[in-house]
Amino acid sequence: MSDPLRLVVFDVDGTLVDSQGHIVSSMNAAFTSLGHALPTREAVLDLVGLSLEVLMPRLAPDLGPTDHSHLVQAYKVAYMAEREEAGTALSSPLYDGALACLHHLNSLPDVVLGVATGKSKRGLDKLIEGHDLKGLFVTQQVADFHPSKPHPAMLHSAMTEAGVGAGNAVMIGDTSFDIEMAKGAGMRSIGVNWGYHSADKLQAATRLVDTFDQLQLALREMWSDQT
């Protein structure tokens, strides 16, 4: 009997790519352009993964809805401008081992890959193009069409598109939002320790890993436990 089809869904920022410098500098540019005090780097990175419309009120709770809306637009403008100037490879470099891991998993006949990210569709498309990742992800869930993480809507859609049930799906992410989203969708999760949330915030994950090699091993062990 053949193995069941497995779905591995990746977060992007802080999991596949190290975009923290780009995110923080774009956020600073947005706040500066509108004359607001800059948030701390730690505060920004702590909220990465949320949709911008949810992130801004948390990042700047003393400002009103109009200011939050202006900040979202200013951030998008700054982010796109920096990306165009520096290029994807420099503004959002892949973590060491990420590309090899993706290609290895994609080569397995019983595994399909997906993405669930707080990025916009345009932002994800640019990243996939910039890193030559086209064709790797059978399902791509973005902030444009879903409630913000940790709402499980992205993962529900990913499983539907891939034709895989929650028992055979795993979410990979670097933030508590990813882990909570997976729990809400009834999926197992693997928290990665190289991203933007510290390990103590990822304790609810099924597994924690420090490298992409450990990630591949953790997946094999999780799947082996099911057989």
Image (cartoon, rainbow, N blue to C red):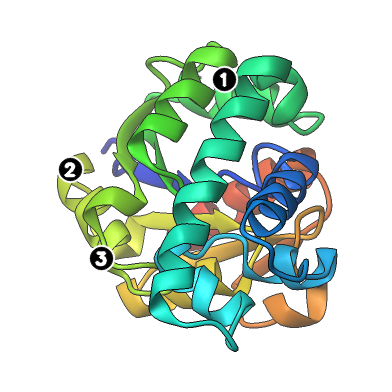
Amino acid beneath label 1: His
Crowdedness near tag 3: few (<14), some (14–19) or many (≥20) residues, C-alpha within 10 Å: some
Q: Is residue 158 left or right of residue 98?
A: left
- Which quadrant holds residue 96? top right
**View extreme (bottom): residue:** 62
Q: Of 56 and 226, which appears nearest the observer?
A: 56
Is 132 situated left or right of 3 in this image? right
Mark before the other along the chain sequence, 1 or 2: 1
Residue visible at 38% across and 55% down in the picture = 169
Asked whether the viewer can see residue 97, the reply is yes
- Mark 3 and mark 2 lie on one chain; the one further toward the N terminus is 3
Q: Amino acid at mark 3?
A: Ala
Say if 172 sits above or below 42 in the image: above
Residue 76 position (above or below residue 97): below
Neighbours of disc 1 within 10 Å: few (<14), some (14-19), many (20+): few
* Apparent side of residue 156 relative to residue 86 in the rendered image (left or right): left
- What amino acid is labelled 2 in the image? Glu
Q: Which residue is more in the foreground, 226 or 219?
A: 219
Figure quadrant of the C terminus: bottom left
* Coordinates of residue 28 in the picture (x, y in percent): 74, 54
Residue 165 x/y as whole percent: 23, 58
Query: What residue would you read off at disc 2?
Result: 161
